[in-house]
Image: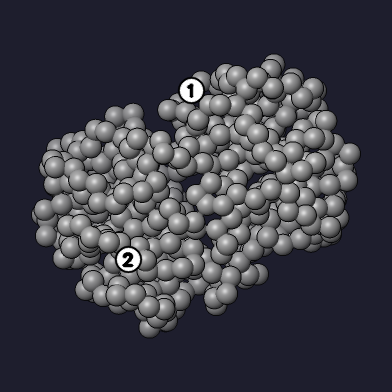
């Protein structure tokens, strides 16, 4: 295949190994991922279908494909069947948000060796909170049944053993994502790997005696560039994932950040030179902190008792207070006056923006299309966020809307690469984002994007400018992937 500015993922061999199926995501070709087939020994790729949101799995007889499709506008996810040539689509099973079949780059469903069941990672929400499990979807009638009673923090990829007596999968319980064995039909789970690394793709040899997986290792530390001079940027932390879970400056020049230094995601604070590091949260899992403009509070997202909500605490970590009440209400961001918090909710279906008064009152819905990661402008009059709307032009990117509600006033074809972060410039005239190694600025007047930093090497995961715009904090580091062969994987 010729080089191109696209993402390729979900590689799957046909049963006879003559072809490779892959999913292609191209910035210029609309909102949907496309499934292609290419001869494994080389040749022209052939497009099979649109709107494929997981790696495909091939039926044992090689005649059909199955995959997950995310119908964001409808708030449902589907397991879809199709002929091996891409024709004859049929929706086999449907889940309505907040329950869903998992669908993203890390997802792989699996067709059982007897052809009767498709195993899928599934996301659920009940009175105890949200969780993942593994379900089997009947190929005959689309009904679901649990393949294990265990509740997980995350499930990504699943693959059947060749004899049908179990599966291997990537999943996270209380630690990092590991490779697990799940017996069938009794659903007993046991670890195959047990370390501090994360694991991604997992595939088995034909005899299921060995598996290949991708071991992922991320390192992130906080750097500070005085007066925004990236040539003078200096590393001020030496942890593992410092700043990856969020960065914000306080009014008095300190840095609030997310870190896993204590073993779990929590909110920390330190001086700008890295001294006086102190953990502020101790319960649940906490991330994406934002210091209030008045210097009194920190707003953040917290997962506690299985539910995720927007919270607020004093600058010293005291008086934590839950601001929203639901199963999935994330990424809370305060207005400059601290009276409102804007957040993302999935309690009604697809992810949408809402705002709620901090001192209590009814929340107000701001968007209908799928939206994420809101940030409020310095004057409090506008909200910017990422969006996905197949009816819009462009169908995905960044949009700006009035804080008081109403249709978007601007849309930009911004596709971030690296950290999924959006910021306002301190003067409110531009939006800032990450493109891998550097930070870029998109003027609101629709001028051309401007590169603000000139780093060479390493990736930027997060960043924040100080309130006066003169100092820059960055979470920088690298992600390494190593292919690992594990023998005797049963």
Q: Is residue 470 left or right of residue 68?
A: left
Q: Which residue is mark 1?
A: 195
The answer to whether one can see residue 476 in this image is no
Q: Which numbered circle lies on residue 298?
A: none
Counting from the top left corner in percent of width and height, residue 459 is at 44, 50
Give the mark count: 2
When the figure is inspected, residue 54 is found, relative to residue 401, above or below; the finding is above
Which sits earlier in the primary sequence, circle 2 or circle 1?
A: 1
Residue 406 visible within the image: yes
Image quadrant containing the N terminus: bottom right
- Vertical side of 374 occupied by 312: above or below: above
Name the quarter where the C terminus is drawn.
top right
Q: Nearer the viewer, residue 459 or 103?
A: 103
Residue 364 badge: 2
Which residue occupies 41% across, 77% down?
408
Where is residue 271 shown, x and y percent of the image? 15, 45
Distance from Cα at disc 2 to Cα at disc 1: 44 Å
Residue depicted at x 16% and y 65%? 337
Query: Pointer 1: residues within 10 angstroms few (<14), some, or many (20+)?
Result: few
Q: Position of residue 117 (x, y in %)?
A: 75, 35
**How was this image coloured?**
one colour
Q: Are there few (<14), some (14-19), or many (20+) residues within 10 Å of tag 2?
A: some
Could you tell me residue 168's position as x and y percent?
65, 27
Under circle 1, the secondary element is: loop
- Find residue 431 and report its image quarter: bottom left
């Amino acid at each position: 295949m010729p080089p191109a500015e696209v993402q390729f993922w979900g590689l799957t061999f046909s049963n006879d190994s003559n072809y490779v199926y892959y999913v292609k995501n191209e910035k210029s070709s609309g909102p949907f991922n496309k499934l292609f087939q290419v001869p494994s020994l080389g040749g022209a790729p052939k497009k099979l279908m649109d709107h494929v949101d997981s790696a495909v799995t091939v039926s044992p007889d090689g005649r059909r494909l199955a995959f997950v499709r995310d119908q964001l506008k409808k708030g449902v996810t589907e397991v879809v069947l199709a002929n091996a040539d891409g024709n004859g689509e049929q929706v086999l099973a449907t889940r309505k948000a907040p329950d869903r079949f998992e669908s993203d780059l890390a997802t792989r469903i699996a067709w059982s060796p007897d052809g009767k069941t498709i195993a899928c990672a599934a996301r659920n929400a009940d009175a105890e909170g949200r969780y993942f499990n593994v379900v089997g979807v009947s190929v005959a009638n689309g009904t679901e049944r649990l393949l294990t009673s265990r509740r997980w923090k995350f499930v990504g990829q699943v693959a059947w053993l060749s004899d049908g007596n179990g599966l291997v999968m990537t999943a996270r319980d209380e630690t990092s994502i590991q490779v697990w064995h799940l017996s069938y039909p009794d659903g007993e789970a046991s670890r195959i790997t047990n370390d501090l690394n994360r694991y991604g793709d997992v595939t088995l040899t034909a005899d299921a005696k060995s598996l290949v997986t991708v071991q992922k290792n991320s390192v992130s530390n906080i750097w500070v560039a005085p007066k925004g001079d990236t040539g003078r940027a200096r590393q001020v932390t030496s942890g593992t994932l410092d700043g990856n879970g969020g960065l914000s400056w306080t009014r008095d020049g300190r840095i609030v950040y997310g870190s896993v230094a204590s073993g779990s995601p929590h909110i920390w604070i330190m001086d700008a030179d890295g001294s006086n590091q102190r953990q502020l949260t101790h319960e649940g899992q906490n991330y994406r902190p934002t210091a209030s403009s008045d210097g009194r509070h920190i707003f953040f997202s917290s997962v506690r008792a299985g539910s995720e909500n927007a919270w607020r605490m004093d600058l010293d970590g005291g008086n934590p207070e839950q601001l929203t009440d639901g199963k999935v209400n994330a990424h809370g961001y305060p207005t400059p006056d601290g009276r409102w918090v804007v957040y993302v909710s999935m309690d009604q279906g697809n992810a949408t923006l809402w705002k709620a008064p901090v001192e209590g009152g009814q929340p107000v819905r701001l968007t209908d299309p799928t939206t994420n990661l809101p940030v409020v402008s310095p004057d409090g009059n506008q909200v910017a966020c990422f969006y996905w709307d197949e009816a819009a032009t462009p169908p995905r990117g960044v949009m700006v809307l009035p804080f008081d509600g109403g249709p978007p006033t601007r849309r930009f074809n911004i596709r971030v690469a690296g950290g999924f972060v959006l910021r306002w410039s301190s003067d409110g005239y531009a939006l800032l984002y990450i493109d891998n190694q550097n930070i870029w600025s998109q003027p609101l007047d629709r001028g051309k994007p401007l590169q603000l930093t000139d780093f060479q090497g390493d990736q930027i995961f997060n960043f924040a400018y100080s309130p006066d715009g003169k100092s820059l904090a960055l979470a920088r580091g690298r992600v390494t992937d190593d292919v690992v062969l594990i023998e005797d994987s049963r």
